[in-house]
Image (tube, rainbow, N blue to C red):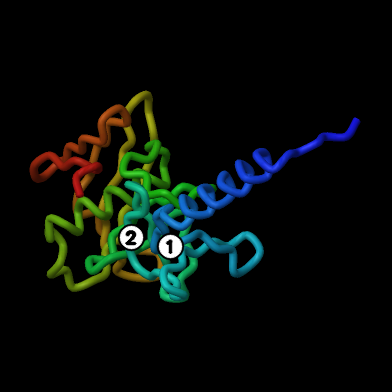
Amino acid sequence: MTMRTGKRGKKRMALGIAFWLACAGTIPVYGGQWVQPLEGQWAYEEDGVFLAGWREIDGVWYCFGADGLMQTGWVRAGEKQLWHYLDQETGAWQPRPVLNEEAAQKLLENAVRKTGYYDNEKYEWEVRIDYMEGDTIYGSIRIITGPSSWITLNNYRIKKKDGIVSADAGGKLNLYEY
């Protein structure tokens, strides 16, 4: 079967193509695009340059390393070097990650650092998750005084449901406050 196109058909087709090309020229061009510079690694490029640091793209926060590569998992970032969880697959910041032991430890460290409670300690301090029972996670802050010696400074109880922390000494903290 052959299709016959008269002068009118060719003219309409030419006008259609011209209209389409004119419209295509007015499609807004956005400043950036996702690129994959290495196998399994993503970056966001604007004007030929990879972004670095914290960036909001299409309403979602991402963190990029100095090399421009998108970060995933638990990372320390920002001026205060606080822990943040970035989705393993998408790299999107998760402000309320599931409170497992690792998340509780890192977010409790953030909450305590923000208070400045232990800034003047002679020894380095660390957060330890001691155990979990029901809907509560039990942790402590301790200073390391030697290879296998420490002093417990405070004990904490974290409610998994809402991230509210109660301390033996001191007030309440919220793991999800930034």
Relative placement, left or right, of 117 versus 36 is left
**Which is nearer the eye, 158 or 128?**
158
Asked if residue 2 is positioned above or below residue 129 in the image, the reply reads: above
Q: Which mark is residue 54?
A: none
Amino acid type at image mark 1: Gly
Instruction: Give the foreground label among 2 and 1.
Output: 1
Asked if residue 133 is positioned above or below residue 94 in the image, the reply reads: above
Q: Which residue is mark 1?
A: 32
Residue 169 at what x, y percent from top left?
11, 44
Q: Quadrant of the N terminus?
A: top right
Question: Hey, which quadrant is residue 53 in on the image?
Answer: bottom left
Q: Secondary structure at mark 1?
A: strand
Question: Hey, which quadrant is residue 37 in on the image?
Answer: bottom right
Amino acid type at image mark 2: Arg
Residue 125 at what x, y percent from top left?
27, 63
**Residue in view at x 19 percent, y 40 percent:** 174
Asked if residue 29 is positioned above or below residue 66 in the image, the reply reads: above
**Which is nearer the eye, 135 or 81?**
81
**Which is nearer the eye, 38 or 142?**
38
Q: Which residue is mark 2?
A: 55
**CA separation in Å, label 2 and label 1:** 12 Å
**Residue in view at x 30 percent, y 27 percent:** 161
Q: Secondary structure at mark 2?
A: strand
**Residue in view at x 62 percent, y 45 percent:** 11
Crowd around label 1: few <14 · some 14–19 · many ≥20 (10 Å): some
**Residue in view at x 54 percent, y 52 percent:** 18
Residue 63 at what x, y percent from top left?
38, 60
